[in-house]
Image (cartoon, rainbow, N blue to C red):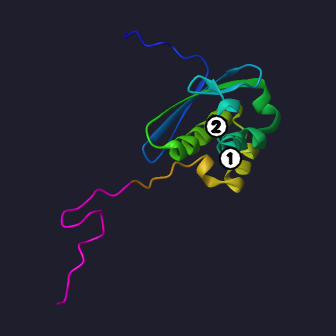
Amino acid sequence: MTDKKKRKGIFAKAKKKRAVARAVVTKGTGKVRINGSAIETMPQEYLRDLVREPLILAGPIAEEVNIDVTVKGGGFMGQTISARSAIAKSLLEYKKDDKLRKKFLAYDRILLVDDPRRVEPKKQLGPKARKKKQSSKR
């Protein structure tokens, strides 16, 4: 067996574009950490609010667990959305409550379903994937 650290608790994973978030839920006091730092230290307030949405929807369940999220890849928005989704999935896995699942799906489907869209690769004869060089008629 390798020297991997064993994680105790419930594990969930979420993706958005190139960003991948992994959340681990353990019993605790309601602390949420993203890449080792608390949510309160996130610089933008709207990003903080986005990450807190599944916690607010879960209600008292979120206050009895600690959530540790690790996010890698992508940009700041993709990382925020994938972390939010990983938190929602981990809370759902922890509680196994069908009412909470329906609540999450009614609020925002992206909380539980990963977004399959990816960036299309660039093609030849143009600067981007679909854009081509403009031809001159004269």
Q: Is residue 57 above or below residue 64?
A: below
Q: Residue at x 51, y 46 (%)?
A: 78
Q: Name the chief secondary structure element in magenta.
A: loop
Could you tell me which quadrant the N terminus lies in?
A: top left
Residue indicated by mark 1: 46
Residue segment shown in magenta:
119-138
* Rendering coords of residue 31 (x, y %): 72, 24
* Rendering coords of residue 43 (x, y %): 64, 37
Q: In this view, does 23 lie above or below 89?
A: above
**Secondary structure of residue under mark 1:** helix
Residue reaching furthest to the right: 60
Of tags 1 and 2, the one toward the viewer is 2
Q: Is residue 107 visible?
A: yes
Residue indicated by mark 2: 43
* Magenta stretch encompasses residue 120: yes
**Secondary structure of residue under mark 2:** loop
* Magenta stretch encompasses residue 132: yes
Cβ atoms under marks 1 and 2 closer than 8 Å: no
- Disc 1 marks a residue whose amino acid type is Tyr
- How many C-alpha atoms fall within 10 Å of the one at disc 1: few (<14), some, or many (≥20)? few
- Disc 2 marks a residue whose amino acid type is Pro
Q: Which residue is drawn at 68% across and 34% down?
A: 91
Residue 114 vs residue 80, the one in the foreground: 80
